[in-house]
Amino acid sequence: MKFALLFLRLLPPEISHFIALNFLNLLYKINLISFLFPHHDSGEPFDFKGLTFKNRLGIAAGLDKNGDFIDCLGALGFGFIEVGTITPLAQPGNSKPRIFRFPSQGAIVNRLGFNNKGVDYLVEKIKLRSFKGILGVNIGANKASEGQKRIDDYIECFSKVIPHADYVVVNISSPNTPNLRKLHLEENFLPLFEALYSARMERKYSNPIFIKLSPDENEETISVILTAVKKFDFDGVITSNTTVNKENLIYSGRHNLSGGLSGKPLYAKSNNLLKIAHAHDPQMFKIGVGGVDSKEAFDMKLDLGASLVQVYTSFIYQGPSIVKKLLK
């Protein structure tokens, strides 16, 4: 396994990502994945709003944007899977290269830009899944959409995925779609939240809706959003998305490193956002993500108030063994 991970690091990030996930999918289809990566249903079940998570560890959105790998990821022992971010229309994302790895620092910088095959493709993939665990869908807006059209994009995705999603995440915090983070401002998020609330009531969707937050906003901005999350009866927040702050990253400067930083250098900032959210409302449901690469980091997220925890970058670097490592 270590040799395979080292080999994949020699390849361009998006190519290695494609190869690794398709290889996992092959192992799943020939019934070898549970033999090679046994997990014995580690961790304790967790219940929330009628949903039973078989453990508190999940895979974050961004790894499986289109729902192509739900079954093989689900077979690795995660308590829940989150797919997306998805948009109404397929879009290619930003120009390449758009992923940069820093293995010695356990970090990745990406500026993918919501590259995906569109919500209709995702829905068809979800319909075909064998995975019976908890599945979340992360929704966004197309790059070209602004103003009311951007809100309409979220509502279109929401309406199409809710028959198939155990929970929905509203992504207002990606740094790689122009002006998306302006949805952290009250004059921008209020119309979106109002539209989502109305759509939820109209369609009688009782499962959780979470808002995914940026770690780069100040405490006052976050507090206003958290108050609105409670006002509109949404079910919690995800803390956090990637950061555009690279001060904790050591790099040569040979690349233009615009984009979001994930992994170990994000750990402190994501934890700070989790602390702010917990101090604002200890009862609010929180999913902690950012820099979780060890059992200690996993436990810290829970200690700071998270009920569930997600990984992304550590899965890229450590492979499926991260599940057993964190849940031991």
Image (cartoon, grey):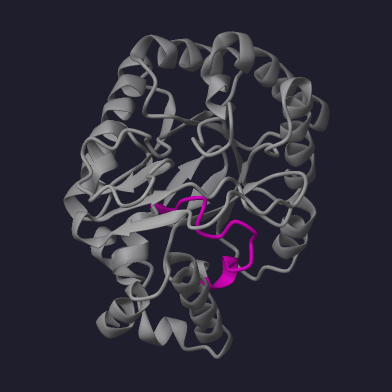
Q: How far across and how far down the image is residue 197, in percent? A: 71, 21
The answer to whether any part of residue 43 appears in the image is no
x and y percentages locating residue 270 in the rendered image: 31, 34
Residue 129 % position (x, y): 67, 68
Let me know if residue 90 appears in the view.
yes
Residue 199 lies, with reference to residue 43, above or below; the image says: above
Viewer-nearest residue: 267 or 133: 267
Residue at figure coordinates x 56%, y 30% from the top left = 172
Q: Which residues are magenta?
A: 56-72
Residue 70 lies within the magenta run: yes
Would you say 51 lies left or right of 200 here? left
Per the picture, the main secondary structure of the magenta-coloured stretch is loop
Position of the N terminus, as image quadrant, is bottom left
Taking 194 as reference, is 54 above or below it? Answer: below
Q: Name which residue lies at 31% across and 65% down.
A: 317
**148 displayed left or right of 66:** right
User: Which residue is farthest front?
Assistant: 254
Q: x, y percentage for residue 54?
A: 44, 57
Residue depicted at 19% across the width and 60% down the height: 104
Q: Is residue 187 above or below residue 251?
A: above
